[in-house]
């Protein structure tokens, strides 16, 4: 039997051009999901990211390591959310910005793209708010964790729209690059390792993730932070726009230009 030809790069991974094809196929499948599984998986994604955000809040409550090291550790814990989304399976709005690759190739309609995003966004919100409610009822949003939740929510609500937009762009570039790397991976271990470093980096650097903020700001409010709906939306709207720009333009369209099929 002929032996498998070795990859000249020495990496046991899909090549970038193959990754682009795999992500485009995934985008076609995601856009075609029926309403019930799409809504269910979107709810789960919001809950998964919220669980990672809850872990981040706990780390920030009492790490005592200084700003940088504490955020580094918090980023490692926060990575749990995207690991659950990718490995367990769920529909995350920010990661689904990569569906744009299939849209620009004409394989997904604009209506199907926007339908996926709407279901994912609202489902993610419902999942995140459910975890907020459970955390509040559990009594865990008190003491040092509650104080940390308040500080996080107040800081996010105080961001100006330009800052929030820019941080949203930078954040989803790293999130979509993490997802991109998982499509190069051949094993679950590879996928987990591919997620950890980009996600830890975005948390460490203070970037803004719309779905994480669906947990972090309401959790701070539940813990007693003086934030309101206006402050919540004042963060969420520019961060969401930034996330779309960073994921769709900064990653999906950029790689589409690099690896789009050569038509004759």
Image (cartoon, rainbow, N blue to C red):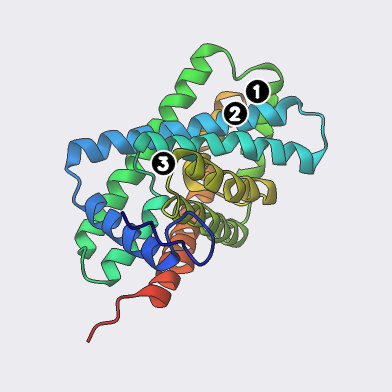
Image x and y of residue 140, in percent: 59, 16
Q: Quadrant of the N terminus?
A: bottom left
Q: How many marks overall? A: 3
Q: Secondary structure at mark 2?
A: helix
Quadrant in the rendering for residue 258: bottom left
Crowdedness near tag 2: few (<14), some (14–19) or many (≥20) residues, C-alpha within 10 Å: many
Q: Of marks 2 and 1, which one's residue comes earlier in the chain?
A: 2
Local packing at callout 3 (Cα closer than 10 Å; few below 14, some 14-19, many 20+) is many
Residue under label 2, please give it: 55
Give how far across and how far down residue 68 sits, in percent.
Answer: 78, 44
Whichever of callouts 3 and 1 sits on the residue coming sooner in the sequence is: 3
Q: Which residue is mark 1?
A: 146
Image disc number at residue 86: 3
For the point 60% across and 28% down, the residue is: 55
Residue at the extreme top: 138
Q: Is residue 79 above or below residue 106?
A: above
- Residue 139 versus residue 101 in the image, above or below: above
């Amino acid at each position: 039997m002929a032996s498998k030809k070795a990859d000249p790069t020495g990496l046991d991974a899909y090549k970038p051009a193959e990754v682009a094809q795999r992500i485009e196929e995934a985008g076609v499948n995601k856009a075609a999901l029926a309403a019930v599984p799409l809504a269910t998986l979107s709810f789960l994604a919001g809950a998964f990211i919220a669980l990672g955000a809850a872990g981040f809040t706990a780390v920030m409550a009492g790490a005592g390591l200084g700003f940088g090291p504490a955020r580094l550790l918090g980023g490692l814990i926060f990575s749990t959310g995207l690991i659950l989304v990718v490995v367990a399976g769920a529909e995350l709005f920010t990661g689904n910005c990569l569906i744009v690759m299939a849209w620009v190739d004409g394989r997904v309609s604009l209506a199907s793209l926007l339908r996926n995003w709407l279901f994912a966004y609202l489902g993610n919100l419902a999942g995140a708010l459910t975890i907020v409610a459970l955390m509040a009822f559990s009594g865990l949003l008190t003491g040092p964790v509650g104080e940390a939740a308040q500080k996080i929510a107040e800081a996010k609500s105080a961001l100006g729209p330009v800052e929030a937009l820019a941080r949203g762009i930078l954040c989803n570039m790293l999130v979509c690059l993490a997802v991109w790397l998982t499509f190069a991976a051949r094993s679950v271990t590879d996928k987990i390792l591919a997620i950890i470093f980009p996600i830890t980096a975005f948390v460490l650097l203070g970037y803004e993730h719309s779905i994480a903020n669906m947990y972090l700001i309401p959790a701070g409010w539940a813990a007693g932070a003086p934030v309101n709906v206006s402050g919540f939306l004042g963060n969420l709207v520019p961060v969401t726009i930034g996330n779309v720009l960073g994921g769709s333009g900064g990653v999906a369209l950029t790689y589409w230009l690099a690896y789009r099929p050569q038509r004759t």
